[in-house]
Image (cartoon, grey):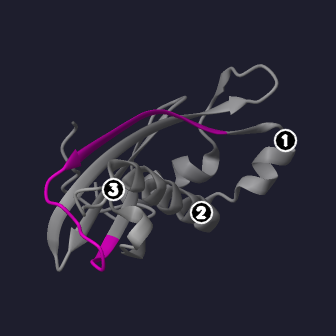
Amino acid sequence: MTTLATGGKPMLVEIDFRVKTYDVDFAGIVSNLVYVRWLEDLRLKMLDEHLPLEPEFRLGRGPVLVRTEIDYLRPLRFGDQALGRMWLAGVRRASWSLQAEFTLEEQLVARALQVGVFVDYRTLKPLPVPEGLRRGMQDETTRGGK
């Protein structure tokens, strides 16, 4: 897994996640699949705040994930209150990457990397990354965060 950025965290979003009964597996710890759902919640919040998807969908384009990596470092259990954070880690011509972390009482319990592309939904061909994501990365760079 790529190491987490040491500079700023462009487009940072945070969500508190309370572990519910349906989030735990037979061993009483949060199921691996729950982290994927939490990553989706974080990614959608970030896009809602910085690049709303409805206009993109109306134009026949939108994001598609091509990679997700998760390092599980410590277990979470029923009733735990985890803090999830996600930020834009990089932008290339046709792809973008996001990094995320989950903490419990300020201790890292999991970290993740996601890579995506924007595609034309008719052809499924990749498109250049939308200006809203490029601008988010550039804004952080001009503030000295990266």
The residues colored magenta run: 63-83
Horizontal relation, residue 123 to residue 44: left or right: right
94 versus 136 height, above or below: above
Tell me the number on the disc at residue 59. 1
Kindly state the secondary structure of the residue where label 3 is placed.
strand
The secondary element bearing badge 1 is classed as: loop
Seen from the viewer's position, the closer of residues 37 and 102 is 37
Q: Is residue 142 visible?
A: no
Q: Which residue is mark 3?
A: 100
User: How many labels, in total?
Assistant: 3
Q: Is residue 12 left or right of residue 28?
A: right
Secondary structure of the residue carrying tag 2 is helix
**Residue drawn at the location 33% of the way across and 43% of the way down:** 113
Residue 50's disc is: 2
Q: Which of disc 1 and disc 2 is earlier in sequence?
A: 2
Type of amino acid under label 1:
Leu
Rendered position, 113 above or below 93: below
Mark earlier in primary sequence (3, 1): 1
Give the image location of residue 85, x and y in percent: 35, 66
Tags 3 and 1 in contact by the CB under 8 Å rule?
Answer: no
Between the C-alphas of marks 2 and 1, the distance is 17 Å
